[in-house]
Amino acid sequence: LASTDFSADVLVIGAGQSGLAVGYYLRRAGLSFQLLDDQPAPGGAWQHGWDSLRLFSPADASSLPGWLMPRPVDHGFPVRDAVIDYLTQYEQRYALPVQRPVRVVEVQDSGQGFAVHTTAGTWQARAVVCATGSWSHPFVPNYAGQADFGGVQLHSAHYREAAPFAGQRVLVVGGGNSGAQLLAEVSRVAQTTWVTEKEPRFLPDDVDGRVLFTQATQRYHAQGGAVPAPPPSLGDVVMVDSVKEARERGALSSVRPFARFTRTGVVWADGREEAVDAVIWCTGFRPALSFLKGLDVLEADGRVATTGTHATKRPGLWLVGYGSWTGFASATLIGVGRSARATADEIRAFLSGGVTSTL
Ligand code: FAD
């Protein structure tokens, strides 16, 4: 690995919504920082969302710190490309210093801080913030016979549109919002079966992401800051228009998982075989943190032990935006600002006096 090519007080890895929110508060704190992102363009994971993807909250309830997302002209919830535009403009508006495409390959202890090895040279940094999200690390559960299945397998991370599945027999696996929304879309053109571990939990029709966030925030404060337990949960299915329409068509019923794959389909728990052309995995993601393996902070589940957003075992290292384990609602546009602000405050204290965590 190369010797040091560049340096910054704070290096933020990832410039999706989480990295940008951290950048906003680092700028306000007057710190020297740099963001690195491995994509060719702004927008983080939203660049890879499917074509019909809409937020499940209105624009003003889906905003990063400092600047509200503009309202869509059609008065609906913002579409994918509107989020990408917003993040692109946000980056410019606050002159956030992002270098892309630059992929972080490994973070090592350098004695005085961190040596961050990338596809464009090595950075020296006193503090590192991981904001790499999870899109690049899709999770697919293990099923017997999966490797021999001759049909198509696609994770929701790579799904764009229903057209390639027209006329096919498709299993949509996973009971969260991605599963419900892709089922709603694919069931219009294909013969679908929705496979979920247990009966999906549908929110009332009038509960959108904003209501959910507000209710969960109230419980969060009532519990003195502990992460709220369901119900309702941010993972429950929001009844966006396409999902309501699928319910009206009778396309929303679900079955429990199959036992194994065959070459041409699946075998259900009762022994019945069924031919299947394609399986769409809506089974979630894991944090994209493999570049931390040299620091000895990764736990068996791929996460890092945290106190607030600070890595409990490693001074100078923070993680923002990965979900409740890095801060309440931190994997949402509206929720990440709070974690980002606390993180910038801690980094300022750390750089000036060596304090690692105040949360
Ligand atoms: P990302 O957007 O993934 O950004 C991380 C960036 O880091 C990416 O550009 C990535 O390529 C880059 N990166 C990764 N590894 C490296 C590396 N080693 N080196 C350099 N760069 C790297 N939230 C809401 O608030 N409202 C919604 O309605 C909503 N709907 C959603 C619908 C779907 C289908 C999904 C999947 C999520 C939704 N979310 C929603 C959740 C959330 O807003 C996103 O998951 C969000 O993209 C997470 O932002 P992030 O910045 O943490 O990660």
Image (spheres, helix red, strand yellow):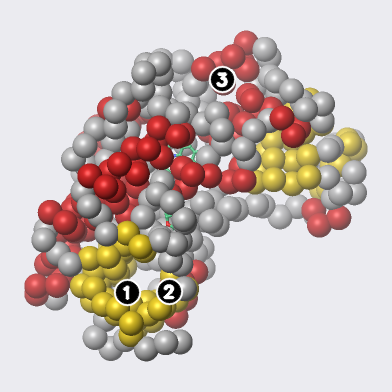
**Kind of residue at badge 1:** Lys
Check the picture and name the quadrant holding the C terminus. Answer: bottom left
Residue 182, percent across and down? 62, 31
Label 1: element kind: loop
What residue is shown at x 59% (from left), y 29% (from top)? 180
Residue 200, percent across and down? 58, 30
Q: Is residue 57 left or right of residue 30?
A: right
What residue is shown at x 51% (from left), y 51% (from top)? 135
What residue is shown at x 29% (from left), y 32% (from top)? 69
Q: Could you tell me how far apart the alpha carbons at marks 3 and 1 are, in whole angstroms?
A: 45 Å
**Kind of residue at badge 2:** Ala
Label 2: element kind: loop
Which callout, 3 or 1, points to the residue nearer the camera? 3
Which callout, 2 or 3, points to the residue nearer the camera? 2
In this rendered view, identify the residue nearer to me: 208 or 65: 65
Name the mark on residue 313: 1
Vertical position of residue 288 compared to residue 85: above or below: below
Task: Examine the image and state in which quarter residue 250 appears.
Answer: top right
Mark 2 or 3 closer to N-term? 2
Which callout, 1 or 2, points to the residue nearer the camera? 2
What residue is shown at x 47% (from left), y 56% (from top)? 39
Label 3: element kind: helix
Vertical position of residue 156 compared to residue 316: above or below: above
Q: Is residue 195 left or right of residue 314?
A: right
Q: Which residue is mark 3?
A: 242
Mark 3 or 1 closer to N-term? 3
Residue 52, percent across and down? 55, 29
Q: Are marks 2 and 3 in contact (CB under 8 Å)?
A: no
Name the mark on residue 120: 2
How dense is the environment of label 2, judged by Cα within 10 Å: few (below 14), some, or many (20 and up)? Answer: some
Q: Could you tell me how far apart the alpha carbons at marks 1 and 2 are, in whole angstroms?
A: 28 Å
